[in-house]
Amino acid sequence: MSTLLLVLLGLLSLILCVLRGRNRREDEPPLIKGWIPYIGKALEFGRDAYSFLEEQKKKFGDIFTVHIAGKYMTFIMNPLMYPSIIKHGRQLDFHELSDKVAPLVFGYPPVMSRNSPGLHDEIIRTFQLLQGDNLTALTESMMGNLMLVFRQDHLAERPGEEGGWKSGSMYEFCNSVMFEATFLTIYGKPVSASRHSEMRTLREDFVRFDSMFPLLIAQVPIRLLRQTKVIREKLINYFLPHRMSCWSNTSQFIKRRSELLDQYDTLRDVDKAAHHFAMLWASVGNTIPASFWAMYYLVSHPEALEVVRQEVLDVLNLSGVEFNRDKDVTLSREQLEKLLYLESTINESLRLSSASMNMRVAQEDFSLRLDSERSVAIRKGDIIALYPQSLHMDPEIYEEPQTFRLDRYIQDGREKTDFYKDGQKLKYYRMPFGSGSSMCPGRYFAVNEIKQFLCLLLLYFDLQLEEGQSRVTVDSGRAGLGILLPSTDVCFRYRLRTV
């Protein structure tokens, strides 16, 4: 009887410990725990992260710690404090999170392990092939592949269609064009054909996997998501080495990664394939919704659309090129850089649609300096989080932040970079691609892709929204993961331009 009593007392002590969780220390930020053990505030955060964080900011100020699904996350809500956080390279590490979560999501072994010495650093180095001079070849390849998809799927008029309007779903349109053109640019094409015959099936499987991505990032075991596990296996198998070896025009980026993975005998073919599948998601998972939002904001603002269209025509004319819809268009990397209003359009659409979360893991107990006067105590293992959507929607930084403005990032004929908070100029005022060492290494290629896609749309097509549709809003279900999806798709009309 006494043994049973001791066991019960032990269980009671454990339950009380779990229920109580940790308590705030005097020099730590305000602690928001919630009343559900382990879950904490995860449900409220997941329902609408932006509104939840803004509510906590009103109650507790610019910095507070929230208990979310067993993690303690300290949110820094004042963008003037961002530089202090980003420069803490030694105490705050990004790779601990990414190296733990990505293998679980995409199905490859941990990169930072004794079985793969040096692999992590070598993988990081391959991203240089997406930047600098290497970007020129990628941009040229993407232009050709976009023209290929547009020419075969949308520019060829069929009998009875001459000059007439076609109807479509805007997100599906963006998805089909950008997915395939990006795939061909990064991974290449079959030796005996210009396009992959299984592309539609691959894209549909990718969409199904992507719809479950938030659960996988939340570390829900994939064995509990049986259909997703099957789909992931199909997607990984598409990139097995014996299949990829039959593709031509593969980018230098993927060639180098393949060579690198082949150097490690501990990696199975399926592990290598999983790495390539992960890069597919990195290449299109956010670029496709970003393309949609840029297209949507232009088509829903016809005057802005005409300004950007004329800008593209003017840049072509300066190069001595007169647009002809019967000829393929080529826009070089240098020409794309001259499109000031197009750049502002993309930046504005990213501001309105991005909800990424910049996270670092504390490597030790330390005092985090916020500014010249304030610092707070941080515990080892806690997550420090920046949530840039809060600065993107701050009316002090952006007047009427919910409104699309074509020229928001233009001033005196050049890019505007002066944005202020509390009278101080912000170093970080737009952050769709992360920050510091965790900034997306493919961001330059992604922006160029979107520019090219929009240029071809505006040059070749008249575009209109179908009447009677409500304004499209974002779906907050992917908050923290990058570009938000639209809550519904959009019906639009398009036809070949006659000039």
Image (cartoon, rainbow, N blue to C red):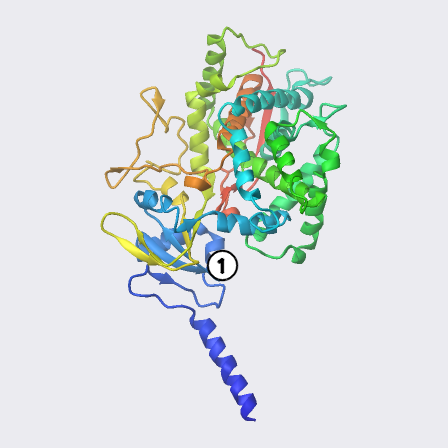
Residue nearest the observer in this picture, 461 or 484: 484
Q: What residue is disc 1 on?
A: 43
User: On the rendered image, what quadrant is the C terminus found in?
Assistant: top right
Residue found at the very far top of the displayed protein: 320
- Position above or below: 277 against 301: below
User: On the rendered image, what quadrant is the N terminus found in?
Assistant: bottom right
Left or right for 108, reference 320 = right
Residue 290 drawn at (x, y percent): 51, 34
- Position above or below: 344 against 484: above
Q: Residue at x 44, y 58 (%)?
A: 381
- Position above or below: 290 against 316: below
Residue 198 lies in what quarter of the image? top right
Q: Residue at x 45, y 74 (%)?
A: 17
Within 10 Å of disc 1 (Cα), the crowding (few <14, some 14-19, many 20+) is some
Residue nearest the observer in this picture, 395 or 451: 451
* Residue 279 appearing in the image: yes
Left or right for 291, reference 20 = right
Residue 454 drawn at (x, y percent): 53, 24
* Residue 295 appearing in the image: no
- Position above or below: 374 against 457: below
Q: Amino acid at mark 1?
A: Leu
Q: Residue at x 73, y 31 (%)?
A: 245
